[in-house]
Image: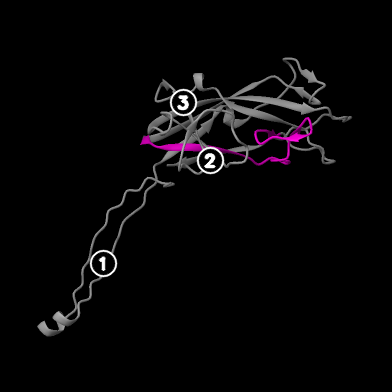
Amino acid sequence: MKKNTLLLNFSVMVMLAFSSNDAFAASQTTTIKLQGQISPSSCDIAMDNAGSIKLNSSGGVNKSSVTGSIALPTKKLGLMILCRGATSFAFRSRDIALNAGNVQLAGENSRELFSLGMTNNGQAIGGYLAVIDRQHSSMDGKTIPNILISENEGASWRSGDTTLSPSGDSIYSWGSQTTPESVRMVNVNIILKPFLFNINHPDSLKINGMTTFEIVYL
């Protein structure tokens, strides 16, 4: 997979060294010099409210005795990517909060859970799922037909589950069932489903989830 779109101009310089017709017939030296410039397609990425989301229980909470967690109201995040021209690209999400990759629900690790940080004494506060809402996402003004997922940096693609991975191992794009399409503008609506663990804590908890989103040029 090419990480950048390549605009390559090259020049060829040929040098022939000889001192006589006999020498030329016996030995020839040719040097080729390639010159060019690699220019990546330029896209900008932004989020609603500068990516700041406040979690609260104003909409009510749902306690689960099975998972030992407290579900908070869902939130929506708008991810916008704008390019100067039609470009083939994807994005990846990577959880960089404390306890990233170690969030357990009902005693089991999940590859799909993002972290909401840890308390001062090392207890996991909670986590969240991040799901792409395809029906309310668009590419160049049209509803995205398929969310495409690659687990090998774009060597192959599949359509299917729209739950984001927090590890950064998967990248996400859009288009037909197997091929990402070049677009100029993408608006991705992401639904966040946060939850807290039943932590006995005398003071208020400081939730500190943090995730990066990165453009990957194909």
**Is residue 20 among what the camera can see?**
no
**10 Å crowding of disc 3: few (<14), some (14-19), many (20+):** many
Give the residue at x 29% y 62%.
34
Q: Position of residue 93 (x, y in %)?
A: 58, 37
Magenta segment boundaries in residue numbering: 86-115
Q: Which residue is mark 2?
A: 151
Q: Secondary structure at mark 2?
A: loop
Q: Which residue is mark 3?
A: 146
Residue type (three-letter) at the residue carrying disc 3: Asn
Q: Is residue 69 magenta?
A: no
* On screen, residue 142 above or below 4: above
User: Residue 65 versus residue 124: which sits nearer the camera?
Assistant: 65
Please name the residue shown 69% across and 34% down the image: 110
- How far apart marks 3 and 2 lie (CA) works out to 16 Å
Relative depth, front residue between 129 and 150: 150
Is residue 104 one of those drawn in magenta? yes
In this image, 175 relative to 168: left or right?
left
Q: What's under tag 1, amino acid-wise?
A: Ile
Residue 205 image position (x, y, % from top left): 80, 31
Return the residue at label 1. 32
Q: Quadrant of the C terminus?
A: top left
Q: Secondary structure at mark 3?
A: loop
